[in-house]
Image (spheres, rainbow, N blue to C red):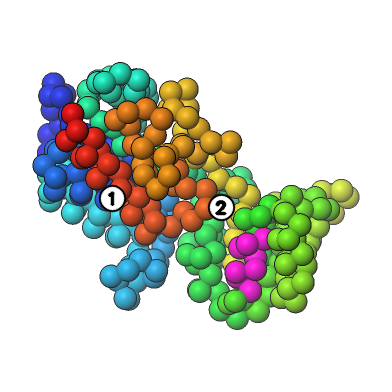
Amino acid sequence: MKQVEKSIMREVIIIGSGPAGYTAAIYAARAALNPLMIASSVEPGGELMKTTEVENYPGFPNGLMGPDLMASFQEQAERFGTEIMFEDVTEVDLTGDIKIVKTGNGETFEAKTVILTTGAAYRELGVARERELSGHGVSWCATCDGFFFRDKVIAVVGGGDSAMEEANFLTRFASKVYVIHRRDSLKASKIMQQRSFDNDKIEFIWNSAITELKGSPKLDGVELEDTVTGQKQDLAIDGLFIAIGFDPRVDLVEKQLQISDERFIKVDGRTSKTSLPGVFAAGDVIDPTYRQAITAAGSGCVAALDAEHYLSSK
């Protein structure tokens, strides 16, 4: 990794990493923009660092581990000259022609453009061993991991549209899908509710909260607590999909950029252009719908091209 120089004016600073950030870095570096990527000191590489086997990323017919994929992204970005800092950005001023970026170690950087790829964090249940069993029976992504549960009994926790979409999708693989919800009615749209009620493979467990994850080294069940009576019971399952929402990481910029009602950074149509000139965004921080590595990578490419065109126009 190159030694990062503070004094020079940057053409591009990328805040965040993951598929969007690394792809933006690859394209920006190949365009001779000498990008600086400031990745997180805690979770560089994004959500894929928590994923075990990735089988749906094109070009890898035998699949690979999420961290290995991110290591390849990083290696490719560095090969073309991207400078990478594993620090946390604590403050930005994006309103002027020159963008100011400050990090937790007290350094300040200036750039003509900034690309935001800060991602979104899936909400967790907050029960013991949740992280430990991630990738070992616990997942936040049905389209990523559903294939691994063919003919298995699994559960989805949540009551919104996302939970119903996950449950219905998972019936393609699983022999049975429980939907665990802490209330006695769903927040999902009526059409999504009805689709789930009509699916013979889906069974609802109402007024229930998960209090314990069981099994080692893989999940083999959960403990449920009735939210009305407090009574507890065990439920044997092979997999658990958590669909209780996710939070785009916009705290850094929400007072400077336009943010959607769902709290994602607003961009102009299919571009990566935000409400401020010279500021672009890509990946899960702009995407409430797909949240896949391949779509994030594609939007990272868009952001780098948009930044290049912006700089050329100046």
**Residue lying at 81% horizontally and 57% vertically, measured from the top left:** 206
Name the residue beneath numbered marker 1.
301
Q: Quadrant of the N terminus?
A: top left
Per the rendering, the mark at residue 130 is: 2
**Residue sitting nearer the eye, 52 or 274:** 274
> Is residue 170 highlighted in magenta?
yes
- Distance from disc 1 to disc 2, alpha carbons, whole Å, reads 33 Å
**Residue lying at 49% horizontally and 44% vertically, measured from the top left:** 121
Estimate how packed mark 1 is, as few (under 14), some (14 to 19) or many (20 or more) residues with alpha carbons within 10 Å: many
Left or right: 270, with 77 as reference point: right
Residue 39's image quarter?
top left
Q: Is residue 293 above or below residue 78?
A: below
Left or right: 249, with 64 as reference point: right
Residue range of the region highlighted in magenta in the rendering = 164-171
Callout 2 secondary element? loop
Residue 15's image quarter?
top left
Callout 1 secondary element? helix
Amino acid type of disc 1?
Cys
Q: Is residue 61 above or below residue 69?
A: below
Residue 256: percent from left, percent from top: 43, 23
**Residue lying at 39% horizontally and 34% vertically, measured from the top left:** 274
**Residue lying at 56% horizontally and 52% vertically, measured from the top left:** 130
Q: Earlier in the sequence, mark 1 or mark 2?
A: 2
